[in-house]
Image (cartoon, rainbow, N blue to C red):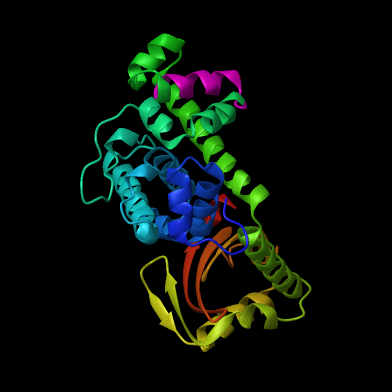
Amino acid sequence: MLRGRVPSDADLVRAAQGGDATSLGLLLERYRASLYGQALGILGYGPQAEDAVHDAFVVALRKIDAVREPAAVGGWLHAVLRNVCLMRLRTGRDEVLFDEVRLPTREDPSERSVEESIDQLAMREWVWTALSELPEVLRVTAMLRYFGGRCSYEEMAAILGVPVGTVRSRLSQARLRLADALLETAGLAHDEARRLQESSTRYFGAAAEEINRGQGYELLLNAYSDAPACFLGDGQTLHGRGVVIESLEGDLEAGVKLHPTNVLASKDIIVLEADFENPRDDPFHCPPATTQVHFQRDGLTYRVHLHFAPRPREEEG
């Protein structure tokens, strides 16, 4: 791990290709917010977007050696993420066969088993350590899939004596654990991402408290530039600070409260996830929850993509 300066993307890729899992974790943390924003744009609001990011992380863990231009790894990661999303849309299922994810390289990497790939990356010890911390049923399933000669889902189901759906569910959980382990490794070793995360979490938390106390929305408004563009989930685009003010004023007057549940931050991109608490006399004023992707320049949001959880039908309320 490089010390004394903030490592560039190229630094992190080269270190990761040399076997440094911490550098790979830091690289993925650096791009997590922008990747999540891209997944939301393709898959829409919901857990599939977050799952797609985790899938892309595992592809990166296995295939980082395929990156030919380390300085352009951001484009490579976004291309991987896009291919994962398109595969999910094409199959109509959560299942992603990693060997079928097309890699954005100028030349096709040579065919290797997962075990050989991990050996080349010198990350085998890290991967086995991460796997050893999984519950036994997840560990066995992951070992069969990633280190057992590419068993099919049907073969794994027969070996484990469980339905195919259970195999898919266990692999999904294992991928999530591996992705989280990479990010945790980066967070423990480097504070670049943590500083951004903590600062953004404090800011949006204070803005929500201001709104929830009925004291206004100045903090949240101050996150925007003078002329932001707001992209809504239905394809509509609105422009100008007045649009933001009108929305905030309407919610404040109605007594809506905002409860942030998660903040992701990377350079120039912040993802805010939050629940809405509607007043009892107006329970359908806002959707249940929102995910906002803030694209920033000079510390201010000049473009925001707004995604909302589906509204419950009033007759069900």
- Residue at the image position 47 percent from the left and 24 percent from the top: 142
Q: In which quarter of the image is residue 125?
A: top right
Is 233 covered by the magenta stretch? no
- Residue at the image position 43 percent from the left and 70 percent from the top: 232
Is residue 156 shown to the viewer in this render? Answer: yes
Position of 210 relative to 76 (above/below): below
- Find the residue positioned furthest to the left: 107
Q: Quadrant of residue 281?
A: bottom right
- Residue at the image position 42 percent from the left and 29 percent from the top: 119
Viewer-proximal residue, 254 or 98?
A: 98
Position of 72 relative to 316 (above/below): below
Residue 71, given in percent of the width and then of the height, sits at 38, 61
Is 138 covered by the magenta stretch? yes
Position of residue 114 in the picture relative to residue 211 (left or right): left
Q: Main secondary structure of the magenta part?
A: helix
Residue 222, given in percent of the width and then of the height, sits at 63, 83
- Residue at the image position 58 percent from the left and 47 percent from the top: 183
Residue range in magenta is 133-145
Viewer-proximal residue, 315 or 163?
A: 163
Is residue 310 shown to the viewer in this render? Answer: no
Position of 113 relative to 259 (above/below): above
Residue 127, given in percent of the width and then of the height, sits at 52, 31
Q: In which quarter of the image is residue 279?
A: bottom right
Give the total number of marks visible in the rendering.
0
Residue 43, given in percent of the width and then of the height, sits at 38, 53
Position of residue 144 in the picture relative to residue 218 (left or right): left
